[in-house]
């Protein structure tokens, strides 16, 4: 009775789920069930884990099978759901935009006054990741260059503030542009040699580059003080005003809000500019893009430099926020987190990146109970996301050329 | 001279482990064009399974060589099972997706597996028993080479020869080469492409596990994060030799191993990984096709 392709009986689904469960029980047996202590020669058997894996995978497979069967049986609905209708109306109703934006702005503004400075601190961290996500979005989302060493530029920014302050006593506001500029220079330095590479090779080289930077910071003790890092980095000043810890936390928060708004503005303008469209063309097809007369070298370098610029700037702020940095803050995992923000948000979508950064950074903070499972879930989310919703939370809309109003009018429903 | 020889043989040992892991990368890349980021984790899981099996067998009271053989078998079987499952879960649904999607899925898988082992076992370094027995005939050369190094070199050589024979002369090997050349054409002549890809993952994972258990027993300790660096370096080896080429992976492994060994022996051991990564960057810039690879031009 079911739709032609997916005609599995309930018995078959049951048997299939059972075999999946058995397979996973087998697969997880040594690592999840047996725990060894080679020093004292003790072995602990944790059979309850086996039961959990078995039952969990069985019911998941069962649910998946039944869902697929249902979906196969029901014809795809042509009528959009209630939520889709609401979303469309929300997007297209300009009268709604003003009040919603005003509400958001009000919330953002009063946030540090209604919540504790602990919360404000977390929010500032999330905002840092928003900017990092937006910066990487230029490189990965717009230009389609997979950069797995993005955190290196973040490190460049952070270390330039820490070191310039330590050696020359330069202040936050002086180093902010310097750090961003230095990171951009590093972006170009990395960009030059990898211009010829594409796709996977580029990913690996950038990863190698990121690791090289971290390893140098870790080992070159005379320059970077090695793994022990640099402490006592001053917080940002405001025309020499002395601030309490709480005031300075709030100050940093507002600073980040400003930076996020600035980044969104710039990235948005960039996206629709000549170079932004060149990036998108480059992402879609390199050869066709060159045939259209776009300078591949300049376009790629611009993407690297601009992406790195934001990372460097945020790096300076990060150093000022934590007042202590060491190489452990700049591992490949950080790059992976930033990348997942971009991917989860839907590559190229600004709103998506903002939401994804908030979700990925705030969720683990508030789910402290799951703190140790955080990275596990993180990896799983990346895989599940790629398999089931590769376009991300919010699909980035493609720019369309609209016909003159005369014809467009007739088709409006 | 002895120091040089010691470094050289140490480099070859290291290199053969890289080569064993690199084979998995190169075979998978050759066949579906994916950098299997989770491959380093397979190697780590292989080593862990080997350690667990060895501990259980020791408690059961088995003797040395039986433990070595059984633990290696367990490691290979489990790593192969993990490789197969990863392909089914994380890569097969993305067969026709844009190129970045499976790569990101692979990164996610790698993070997942690392934390899975971290949570299920421990974050500490675990001592790994020295499973490889000491041979008496090595004794006079002990200042240059140890018996575990001899075993590693021998096992690697045998594995390479076997793999080459499989790929050259068996049905599965022929189907693999066909799939690597042209997936659709292979399908047309009756090759079950999905099965062949699974087989590739299984073989590659098994080799990685073999490398994992050998090197763990040589170095004497393992931890949940050993897969990441080993994976990157093995990938470097694969690229160095020309990705997609099996003799290339072996050669790349040896070159990388010796480079690292000499660099740490004569320059500084702090920058061991920096040398490896710099070598990778340099190779990709100056000879992106690798030592044995052929460069291809893209046609429109």
Image (tube, coloured by chain):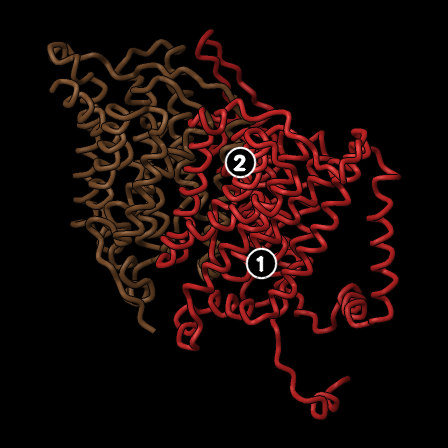
Chain colours: A red, B brown
Residue in the picture at 40% in, 10% down: B59
Residue B201 numbered mark, or none: none
Horizontal side of A339 relative to A78 (left or right) equals left
Quarter of the image that includes the N terminus of chain A: bottom right
Q: Give the secondary structure at mark 1.
A: loop
Horizontal side of A343 relative to B101 (left or right) equals right
Residue in the picture at 61% in, 36% down: A170
The residue closer to the viewer here, B55 or A242, is A242
Near mark 1 (Cα within 10 A), the count class, few <14, some 14-19 or many ≥20, is many
On the question of residue B203 being in view, the answer is no
The residue closer to the viewer here, A196 or A223, is A223
Q: Which residue is mark 1?
A: A347
Give me the chain letter of mark 2: A
**Marks 2/1: CA–CA distance:** 23 Å
On the question of residue A93 being in view, the answer is yes
Near mark 2 (Cα within 10 A), the count class, few <14, some 14-19 or many ≥20, is many
Q: Which residue is mark 2?
A: A330
Q: Give the secondary structure at mark 2.
A: helix
């Amino acid at each position: 009775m079911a739709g032609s392709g997916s005609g599995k009986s309930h018995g078959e689904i049951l048997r299939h789920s059972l075999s999946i469960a058995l397979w996973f029980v087998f697969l997880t047996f040594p690592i999840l069930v047996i725990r060894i202590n080679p020093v004292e020669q003790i072995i602990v058997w944790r059979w309850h884990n086996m039961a959990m894996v078995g039952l969990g995978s069985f019911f998941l497979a069962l649910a998946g099978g039944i869902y697929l069967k249902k979906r196969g049986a029901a014809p795809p609905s042509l009528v959009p759901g209630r939520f889709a209708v609401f979303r469309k109306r929300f997007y297209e109703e300009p009268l709604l935009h003003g009040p919603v934006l005003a509400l958001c702005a009000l919330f953002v503004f009063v946030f540090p006054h209604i919540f504790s400075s602990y919360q404000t601190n977390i929010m500032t961290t999330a905002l840092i990741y928003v900017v990092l996500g937006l910066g990487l979005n230029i490189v990965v989302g717009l230009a389609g260059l997979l950069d797995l060493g993005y955190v290196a530029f973040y490190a460049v920014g952070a270390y330039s503030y820490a070191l310039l302050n330590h050696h020359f006593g330069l202040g936050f506001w002086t180093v902010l542009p310097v750090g961003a500029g230095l990171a951009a220079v590093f972006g170009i330095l990395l960009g030059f040699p990898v211009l010829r590479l594409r796709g996977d090779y580029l990913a690996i080289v950038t990863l190698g580059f990121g690791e090289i930077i971290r390893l140098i910071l870790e080992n070159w003790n005379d320059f970077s003080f090695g793994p022990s890092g640099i402490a006592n980095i001053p917080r940002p000043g405001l025309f020499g005003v002395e601030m309490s810890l709480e005031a300075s936390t709030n100050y940093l928060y507002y600073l980040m809000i400003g930076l996020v708004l600035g980044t969104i503005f710039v990235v948005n303008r960039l996206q629709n500019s000549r170079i932004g469209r060149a990036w998108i063309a480059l992402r879609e097809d390199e050869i066709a893009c060159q045939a259209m007369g776009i300078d591949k070298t300049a376009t790629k370098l611009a993407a690297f430099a601009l992406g790195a610029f934001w990372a460097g700037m945020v790096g300076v702020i990060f150093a000022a926020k934590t007042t202590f940095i060491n190489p452990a803050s700049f591992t490949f995992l950080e790059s992976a987190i930033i990348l997942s923000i971009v991917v989860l948000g839907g590559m190229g979508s600004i709103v998506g990146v903002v939401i994804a950064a908030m979700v990925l950074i705030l969720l683990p903070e508030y789910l402290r109970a799951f703190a140790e499972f955080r990275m596990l879930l993180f990896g799983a989310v990346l895989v599940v996301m790629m398999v089931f919703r590769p376009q991300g939370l919010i699909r980035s809309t493609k720019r369309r050329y609209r016909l003159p109003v005369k014809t467009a009018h007739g088709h409006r429903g | 001279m002895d120091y040089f020889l010691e470094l050289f043989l140490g480099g070859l040992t290291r290199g053969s482990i890289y080569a064993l892991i690199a084979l998995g990368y190169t075979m998978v890349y050759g066949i579906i064009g994916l950098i299997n980021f989770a491959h380093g984790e397979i190697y780590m899981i292989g080593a862990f399974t080997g350690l667990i099996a060895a501990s259980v067998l020791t408690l059961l009271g088995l003797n040395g060589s039986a433990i070595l053989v059984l633990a290696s078998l367990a490691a290979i079987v489990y790593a192969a099972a993990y490789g197969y499952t990863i392909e089914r879960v994380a890569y097969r649904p993305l067969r026709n997706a844009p190129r970045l999607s499976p790569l990101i899925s692979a990164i996610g898988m790698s993070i997942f597996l690392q934390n899975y082992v971290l949570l299920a076992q421990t974050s500490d370094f675990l001592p790994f028993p020295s499973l490889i027995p000491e041979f008496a005939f090595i004794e006079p050369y002990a200042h240059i080479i140890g018996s575990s190094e001899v075993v590693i070199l021998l096992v690697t050589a045998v594995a390479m020869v076997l793999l080459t024979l499989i790929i050259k002369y068996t049905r599965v090997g022929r189907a693999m080469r066909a799939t690597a050349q042209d997936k659709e054409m292979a399908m047309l002549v009756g090759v079950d492409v999905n099965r062949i890809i699974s087989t590739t993952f299984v073989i590659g994972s098994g080799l990685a596990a073999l490398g994992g258990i050998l090197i763990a027993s040589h170095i004497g300790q393992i931890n949940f994060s050993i897969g990441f660096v080993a994976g990157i370096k093995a990938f470097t080896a694969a690229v160095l030799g020309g990705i997609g080429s099996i003799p290339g992976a072996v050669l790349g492994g040896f070159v990388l191993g010796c480079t690292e060994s000499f660099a740490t022996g004569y320059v500084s051991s702090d920058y061991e990984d920096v040398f490896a990564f710099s070598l990778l960057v340099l190779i990709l810039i100056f000879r992106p096709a690798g030592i044995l690879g052929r460069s291809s031009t893209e046609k429109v």
